[in-house]
């Protein structure tokens, strides 16, 4: 059922201590690599959102026994009986990644190394997203991939993979991970050179599982992998989900909130750096490591913010956070400019032009450029009827914008929020936010 979310002007500060669900990137990878391990992996606080559930069901379809303990709608534990590097079973049915770009692109790397053929597909939305960025390097390794004009569905036939050195044309963790995963099955050392520090969860997890992987600056090398050791990990909270309550607290006067055990991998903390450059302040307490990933309790409060110029290396470290950042920019004094972010145009939707269209309905003028946008703040927002375009992060961005609008906001097609953040509405309500599902 298509659900609508109604958000009301927030008249009281947001206050409280919350946990947000587990990291989506780590959750996808834990299922893929746990399935390929020799032995049983234990994953706690796994994210039961639409995207990683697609990965989980695909690996079940490939013959992996994964048992689930559902603690709540936002927190599952998994026990994965790994089948080893060569133990996956062919599936007669296509593998359906639904809306999940991470699932289909990483999966292509794994499937390219199998001794059987497979068909990788996804939703109408995923079928529009570019796949040449992975089919080109995989083909260079000798993979036999057939795709419709560089888009899903993709058919992958068995072949021997050749090791190679690949210089990534875009800073993309999905492409880097795809090549490294295929590299596990190649006939020698596979080397990936990345232009910027894209998230490194694949590298961290592979190393923790005993793969022969080395990192030297922007160069990552992997030797063929015969065996992966099982993992035992607690998934840290997803900073990309935490970003929504964080920005909400920074823009709703007198708010002060804490996010417990928030993942703080330096390849993911661009949002905190960008908000700090605008005058927001954070404290990180109880620093720890969770599943090889740095984490801490992050506290944030309302701040008077000013404009900023964003570009360069921070962009890839906060690539998923530009929709919600745009709301913070709209409340900051002066003209802010975002550059080097053309990748936003090939996410779930074109997150520059689609967002500009929806924010215009709420009174925000977002001036588009080919690789970014600019916003002049502070802007008073009006409530409106807006649409998520089936993009979870746009849905949540519009909901947070609704809190500072002068009349109620209705977000259509808001159920996609559960693609990455099940329990978003309940979590915001726990902070005192005035929002509810209306159908
Ligand atoms: C992801 C990488 C990013 C990000 C996506 C998750 C991952 O995509 O936008 O939400 O888990 O590897 P790109 O690597 O294509 O930039």
Image: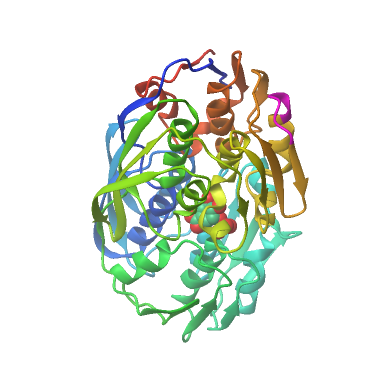
Q: Which residues are magenta?
A: 360-365
- Expressed as whole percent of the image width and height from the top left, the position of residue 73 reads 35, 30
Task: Locate the C terminus and report the quarter of the image it occupies.
Answer: top right
Q: Is residue 311 left or right of residue 89?
A: right
Q: Nearer the viewer, residue 92 or 88?
A: 88
Scheme of colours in the image: rainbow
Q: Nearer the viewer, residue 321 or 84?
A: 321
Place residue 385 in its image quadrant: top right
Q: Main secondary structure of the magenta part?
A: loop
Q: Is residue 97 above or below residue 203?
A: above
Q: Is residue 434 above or below residue 86?
A: above
**Residue plotted at (46% across, 25% down):** 253
The answer, for residue 114, to whether it is visible in the render is no
Q: Is residue 427 above or below residue 84?
A: above
**Residue plotted at (51% across, 63% down):** 198
- Expressed as whole percent of the image width and height from the top left, the position of residue 309 reads 63, 53
Q: Is residue 180 left or right of residue 131?
A: left
- Expressed as whole percent of the image width and height from the top left, the position of residue 409 reads 60, 18
- Expressed as whole percent of the image width and height from the top left, the position of residue 181 reads 47, 69
Place residue 130 in its image quadrant: bottom right
Whether residue 358 appears in magenta in the rendering, the answer is no
Task: Locate the N terminus and report the quarter of the image it occupies.
Answer: top right
Q: Nearer the viewer, residue 150 or 411?
A: 411
| Total number of numbered discs in the rendering | 0
The answer, for residue 245, to whether it is visible in the render is yes
Place residue 328 in its image quadrant: top right
């Amino acid at each position: 059922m298509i659900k609508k979310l109604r958000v009301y002007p927030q008249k009281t500060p947001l206050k409280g201590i919350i946990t947000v669900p587990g990291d989506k990137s780590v959750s996808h990878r834990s299922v893929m690599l746990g399935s390929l391990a020799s032995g049983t992996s234990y994953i706690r606080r796994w994210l039961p959102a639409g995207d990683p559930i697609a990965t989980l069901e695909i690996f079940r379809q490939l013959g992996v026994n994964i048992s689930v303990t559902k603690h709540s709608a936002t927190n599952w534990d998994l026990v994965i009986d790994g089948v080893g590097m060569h133990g996956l079973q062919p599936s007669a049915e296509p593998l359906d990644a639904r809306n999940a770009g991470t699932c289909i692109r990483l999966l292509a790397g794994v499937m390219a190394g199998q001794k059987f053929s497979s068909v990788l597909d996804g939703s109408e939305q995923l079928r529009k997203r570019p796949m040449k960025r992975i089919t080109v390097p995989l083909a260079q390794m000798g993979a036999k991939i057939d795709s419709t004009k560089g888009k899903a569905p993709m058919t992958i036939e068995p072949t021997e993979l050749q090791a190679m050195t690949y210089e990534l044309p875009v800073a993309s963790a999905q492409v880097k991970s795809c090549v490294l995963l295929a590299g596990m099955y190649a006939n020698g050392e596979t080397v990936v050179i990345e232009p910027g520090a894209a998230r490194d969860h694949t590298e961290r997890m592979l190393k923790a599982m005993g793969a022969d992987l080395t990192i030297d600056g922007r160069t990552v090398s992997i030797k063929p992998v015969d065996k992966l050791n099982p993992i035992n990990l607690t998934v840290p909270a997803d900073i990309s989900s935490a970003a929504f309550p964080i920005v909400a607290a920074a823009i709703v006067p007198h708010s002060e909130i804490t996010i417990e055990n928030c993942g703080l991998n330096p390849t993911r903390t661009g949002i905190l750096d960008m908000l700090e450059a605008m005058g927001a302040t954070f404290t990180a307490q109880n620093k720890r490591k969770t599943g090889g990933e740095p984490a801490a309790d992050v506290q944030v409060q309302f701040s008077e913010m000013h404009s900023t110029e964003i570009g360069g290396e921070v962009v890839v470290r906060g690539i998923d956070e530009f929709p919600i950042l745009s709301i913070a920019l709209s409340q900051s004094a002066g003209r802010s400019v975002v550059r080097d972010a053309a990748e936003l145009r090939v996410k779930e939707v074109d997150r520059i032009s689609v967002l500009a269209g929806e924010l215009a309905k709420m009174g925000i003028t977002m001036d588009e450029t080919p690789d970014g946008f600019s916003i002049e703040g502070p802007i008073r927002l009006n409530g409106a009827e807006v649409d998520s375009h089936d993009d979870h992060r746009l849905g949540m961005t519009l909901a947070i914008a609704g809190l500072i609008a002068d009349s109620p906001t209705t977000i259509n097609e808001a159920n996609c929020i559960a693609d990455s953040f099940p329990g978003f509405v309940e979590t915001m309500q726990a902070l005192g936010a005035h929002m509810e599902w209306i159908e």
